[in-house]
Amino acid sequence: MTARKTAAPAAMQDDRALAARLAPATRPADPKAARAAVAALLRDAPALAEAASSAQAQALLEAVADGSPFLWGLILRDPDRVAALFEAEPERRLTEIVESFTAAATSGDERAALARTLRRGRAEAALLIALADLGGLWGCAEVTRALSDVADAAIGAALRFALREAAASSKLRLPDIADPETGSGLFVLGMGKLGARELNYSSDVDLVVFFDPLVAPVAAGEEAVTLFVRVTQSMTKLLQERTADGYVARVDLRLRPDPGATPVALSRDAAMSYYETVGQNWERAAMIKARVVAGDRAAGGSFLKELRPFIWRRSLDHASISDIHAMKRQIHAHKGHGAIAVEGHNLKLGRGGIREIEFFVQTQQLVAGGRDPELQTRGTIEGLAKLNEAGWITDAARDEMGEAYGFLRTIEHRLQMVDDAQTHSLPEDPERLAAFARFAGFASRDAFAKALTKRLKTVQRHYAKLFEDAPPLAADVGNLVFTGEADDPGTLATLKGLGYAEPSSVSAIVRGWHHGRYEAMRSARARELLTELVPAMLVAFSRSGRPDAALFAFDKALERTRSGVALLALIRASPNILELLADVLGAAPKLGETLARRPRVLDALTDPAFFGHLPDRAELDARIADALSEARSYEDLLDRARIAGQELKTLVALRVAAGVVPVEQAAAAFSRIADALTTALFAAVETELRKAHGRVPGGAAAVVALGKLGGEEMTAASDLDLILLYDHPEEATESDGPRPLAASQYFARLTQRLVSALSAPTSEGVLYEVDVRLRPSGRAGPLATRLKAFETYQAEEAETWEHMALSRARVVAGPKAFRRKVEGAIATALCAPHDRTKALADVREMRALLDKEKGGGGPWNLKHAPGGLVDVEFAAQALQLVHAQERPEILRASTLAALAEARRLGVLDDDDYEALTAGGRLQQDLTQIVKLAIDGQFDPKNSPAGLKLRLARAANSPDFAVLQATLKDAQKAVRAAAKRVLAGG
C-alpha cells in the first residue's frame, strides 16, 4: 500500500474531514444510472473508493454524477484530487488554496506558471466548495464567503504579477518589489456580490480600478493612465483567459464611471469628480458594497473614505426610493403584477427574487444610512439585521427576507453548478426542472415549486410594502404605463393630451425600449434609467412643436447607438441635454436625420469634454489624429476621417441648434473643423503619394482656402473652395520615387488625391463637397498651379471678381516656410494698384447680374436677396481692392473683420459700418440655423414651428413675426449702405 493509502484511514477518522461531516442535501433524478456511473469511477480510482466509502459520500457522488456535468467532469479528470478533498478539512484546504495563489505570485514564476496555478486552484476550489455545499457542510453564508475569498486571492495574485511586470519594464518604480501592491497607488475595488463577500458560484467579478497619481511611482516620461491601463489589462487577462486548464474568473469592468468613455484604469480624482457631479443613485447603491480587494489598500481606503459623502447623504434621502422604484418596475416586480411562475423563473431579476431583497436593503440604507452609520454595511443579511435594530423593518421582515435570501442563493448556486454557467433562470422544460429539483434536494418538481413560490411571495409582499406609498411615475402629466404587450388606455389618453398625433405608435415604441428591443436598451441599467426618464422625455418632446417626429427620430437614434446607458445617464444628470435633443429633433429635421443615420454622434454626445464647449484647434487636431491613428489602410483612414468629421460637425450643430453656445461662434467652429480635417488629410495624401512616386526634390505645396472656409464663415452645409499652389527648383523636373512623375503632374496628382480624400463617397458618406474652380483660369487651368504662374496670372490676367475672391484667401496647409511665401504672393496681388473707378464699376455690374439671376425669393433668400449677404461681402471686398495699396492692413479674410478694419482706417463711415455689420451678422446667424436644420430654401409657410422659434431666438427677437420685420429692415439698410460703398461715396 502506498504512503498515501496508509495515511488515508487516519484522515478518514478525523471528524473535521469532509467525508466525516457529510449530510447530502441533494439526490439523483436517475438513481440507477447515477449508481452505475459512480461504481465505474470507483473501480478505476481506488484512492477515491477508499476515501468515499461511506454511504453519505456515495450518495453525494451519485447526486453529482446525475445533476452536474461540470462537477462530474472535474471529478473524472482527477479522482485522486477528489479523494484528497474527501480526506481534508475543507476549511483548512480552502485556506491552503488561497495561500498557494499568494505564494505563486511572489515566487517569480513565469506568467504561464502563475496562470496554471490559478486555474488549477480555482478548479479545485470550485469542486471543494460545491462538495461542502451539496454535502450539507456549509450554508449559504459559508459558501459565498469561500467563493469570495478565492476570488480575492486570485485577483490579488494577478495584480501583483502585473505590477511586477510593469516594474520589470522600468515603467513603474515600486517602493518594494517584494510587496508590489503597497505604495503602487493602484487599487482594485470589488463591487456587487464580490464587494459584499457574497459571490455567486459562477459569477462575474465586478471590478473597478483606480489609481492615485500623487502616490503612483510612475517612471519619468510615462503616462500614468496608459501604464495602469496595461497593468489592468494584464491582470484581467491572467484571470479570464481560457486555457487548457480553464479560467479563473470572468471580469466585468463596466461599473466604473462612464464606462463607454473612460479607460479601464481611471485616476481617483477623475472618478471623484464624476461621482460628485453626475453620479447616479444606482451608483451610490453599487458603492455601498465597494471593497478594496487588491492593490494599494491605503490609497483605496482613502478613496472610499472620501467617497462616503456621495454614498451616504446626511439628510433622509427619499429621492432614492423613486430611483429604485423605477428599477423595480423595470424588472416587473411591482405588486399585483400577475402570478409567479416556476418554470423559467429568473431567481435574480424575477418577481420576488434576489434583486428585490438587495434593493429592499440598499434602498433603505441609502435613505437613512447617512444619519445612521450602523446602516453602512455591505452584506445583505447584516443589512437586514441593522435595519431591524434601527427600527426600519420588523422582526418578521428581517427573518423572512433573510431566510428567503439564503434559500434563493442556495438554489442559484445549484443552478450554476450544473454547467458552471452564469445563469439565474430555472429550466423551462418541465422534465429538466423536475431533474433540477432533485439536484436541489427536493423529492419532486411540485415540492420544489411549493418551497420556491412561498419564498418569492414572501419577498414580493415585503418589497411591495416598501413602495406602497411611492408616487406613480410622472403623476403630474397623467398615466404613463408601458408594461405588458397591450396599450394602456390611460396612457394613450395622456399621450394624446400631450399633443402626440399617433399615441398608439408612441406607446409601442416606448414599450419596445422597455422590453430591450434595441441593443442599447438591453442592459438592466439602461432600462432602469429609461423607466425614470421616459415621462420627462415625452413631456420634452411634446414641447418641441413636432412631438411625434421628434420621438420617432430619437427612436431611430436609440436603435443604432451603442451607448444607451451613457446617453441616458447623461440626460438624467443634465436635463438641459434632454431639452437640447427635444429642441433639435423638433426644430431641425436635418439634424434629426443625422442622429438617426449616424448614431456614433450620440456616442460622441456622451463625452462631456466635447459637450461643454466648442473645441479649439488643438483639441480638434488631437481628436482627429487619434481617430486616424488606428487606420488599417488608406481607405480605412478616409472612413475614419468621415466619422470624426461628422461627429465634430454635428456636435457643433447640436450646440448651436439648442442655444448652448452663441450662434455667432458657429462659423469659426465649423471652419476650424474643416481646417483640421483638410490639414490632416493633406498630410495623409502626401504620404500616400510618396509611397508610389517619392517627392519632388526641394518641392513644396500649400492648400489655399477661399470662399466661406477662407473667410472662416463656414456653415453646417458649406462646401470647400480650395486651390493648391506649389513650387520647386528648376532642376527638379520629376519626383524621385519608384514611379517618377513630372513635377507638374506630381502636384496635379496631389491635388486630385486631396479633392478625392475630402469629397469621394465612401461607406461612411462624403466629408465635404470640394470646388476647385477658383484656381487661375478656372476649369481650363491646371488643377495645381506653380507659384510663379499664380503670381503672373494675378498681376497680368486676373479679373476683378478673381481678386475679390482672393481677398478671402487663407493658407490652411503646407510647410510653414512655403505658406509664408504663398501668403506674401496673395498680399502682393491684392495690394497691387487697382483702378478705383473700374473696380467699383465691375463690382456693381456683378451685383446687378446676380440680382437678375438669383435675387428673387424674398427676404429669406439670405445670400442673394437685395440687402443679403452678397451685398455685405461685395462691399467689404470692394473696399479692400480700392484701399489695399495704401492701407494693406485692410486685408482680412473675414467679411466682418474687413469691415471693422475699414471703419478703423476711416474709409467706411460709422452709419454704413453699423448697417453692414448688423445686417451681415444677423443674416450669417440665421443662415447658420437654416443650414443645420434643413436642406434647401427656408420657407416660413412650410417650416416647423420649432425652427421658426429657434431662428427668432438666434436673432434675440420675441417671436418670428418680429424677426421677419427686423430682417426686412436690416436688408433695406444693408442695400442702401452697399450702394453708397459701391458708388465710391
Image (cartoon, grey):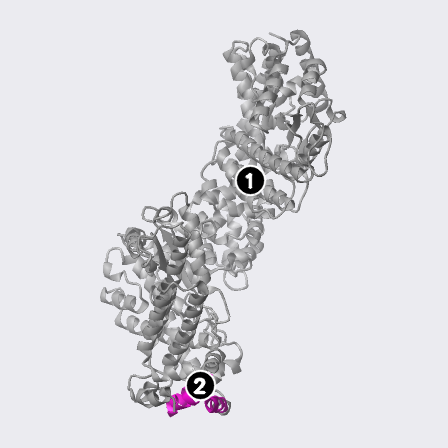
Looking at the rendered image, the quarter that the C terminus falls into is top right
**Magenta span of residues:** 36-64
Instruction: Give x and y (percent) for residue 73.
Output: 49, 80
Residue 864 seen in the figure: yes
The quadrant holding residue 87 is bottom left
Q: Could you say which disc has been placed on residue 63 in the image?
A: 2
Q: Nearer the viewer, residue 581 or 520?
A: 520
- Is 975 displayed left or right of 118 in the figure? right
Badge 2 marks a residue whose secondary structure is helix
The location of residue 514, given as percent across then percent down, is 50, 59
Query: Is residue 975 among the parts visible in the rendering?
Result: no
User: Mostly what secondary structure, the magenta segment?
Assistant: helix
Would you call the spot at circle 2 few (<14 residues within 10 Å), some (14-19), or many (20 or more)? many
Local SS, label 1: helix
Q: Is residue 255 above or below residue 863?
A: below
Q: Could you tell me which quadrant the N terminus lies in?
A: bottom left
- Name the residue at 41% across, 52% down: 228
**Upstream in sequence: badge 1 or badge 2:** 2
